[in-house]
Amino acid sequence: MNKLRAFVLGGSAFLLVSAAWASLTYGADGTTAGLYLRVLLVAALLPAVPKALSHLKLWLRRIAQYRENRGGYSSERGSIFVSETPISDPEATLDALVDAVESAPGYDGVSRDAFSEGEGLTVTHTGFHNTFVRVAGDGRLVVTGASEKAHDLARLAERTCSVALARSRTHPFLKPDPVRGAPRAFLSLFLVVLLLFGVGGVTAAGYPGDTFNPSERVVLVSHDARADVDPGYTDTDAKFDKAAFLVAALDEEAVEIGWENNESAGLEAHARQSLRLSETVRTLLSSARDDGLTAEQAERSARIERDLHGAERRVAEAITERLERGRVEGDRADLRDLRDRLLSASRRSV
């Protein structure tokens, strides 16, 4: 099994298991149904895309070969003869052809050969090219060669085996080939993006809405998943880890407010996001305390709460900095109100 095939099969299985786990952990309703459908669609597409591309490549080769041979056949391009019906006993047919070629004039020799499609015959004769006899997967007899001897051998096969062979414009042994080279690299990149799109569906089902960005959802869901599979990692541990992570995200909002342009709408968006993060952290800490804490956990809870208060103050200070020293275009009243709410939260215990 090549690496690409292992990746698509593993990725598809991972998405299916993740979707099943998420539906049990977070539930499934009208809001998340579309997200789970997206995950299932990606899980189906991952193994299907490489296979579809290889079959597309096969059909393009068949079309190209058909167009090349539409003007007729010549010894330069070679000829392909295929029996109109399958042969009943390939082994006996090849044996009969060996005897017929050895008895017929104009051939230097005939030998059994192993081809990728199975056992066949190589017929040698005067000239640069040999002629080959093989049996296709559907049981049809195939004669190929790039000399006039291919025509003669086809007629000999018809008489010997009592089958009718007709010229074909496409080779019956063409088969889907894996995508290789530069297209394979682009395909791999596309499949990685497709997998991430599916993972995004799982994480959005766990944490819907616009409170969290995609990377934050991945971290939050990873803590939930660890709490389910790691016996030494409790739900309380997960709540504390998620709370600490979101406090760090809240701190980043203060930095982004400093980078934001002067429009009050953009600044307000960051301020509202800060409030949502603050409220989520408080909910997580409150829920963890309701579960009952050990002394060590109580100390960690207090430490996270102190960090939360500090992050809330820093966001409020960043807003004040923009209001007092930076030019803010638009209505400042809502921005001041959001700042005051953050300051009030920073003085309130969880």
Image (spheres, helix red, strand yellow):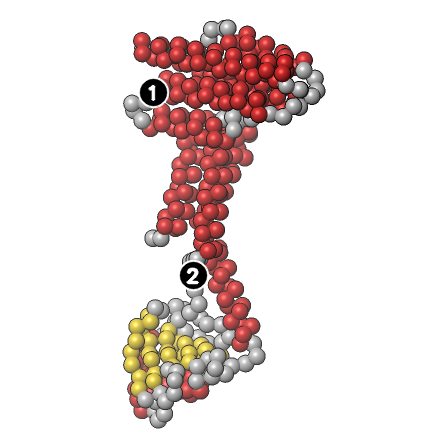
- At 45% from the left edge and 54% from the top edge, which residue is drawn? 184
Count neighbours of disc 1 (C-alpha within 10 A) and say few if under 14, some if 14 to 19, many if 20 or more. some
User: Disc 1 versus disc 2: distance between alpha carbons?
Assistant: 49 Å
Work out whether mark 1 precedes mark 2 in sequence or the reverse, and give the earlier one.
Answer: 2
Residue 121 on image: x %, y % = 33, 79
Q: Secondary structure at mark 2?
A: loop
Image vertical order of residue 190 relative to residue 302, above or below: below
- Determine if residue 166 is in view: no
- In front: 114, or 24? 114
Residue that lies at the very extreme toward the right in this rendered image? 330
Inspect the image, locate mark 1, and give the three-letter code of the amino acid beneath it: Thr
Image vertical order of residue 172 relative to residue 327, above or below: below
Q: Secondary structure at mark 1?
A: loop
**Location of residue 343 by image quarter:** top right
Image vertical order of residue 323 relative to residue 189, above or below: above
Residue 182 on image: x %, y % = 46, 56
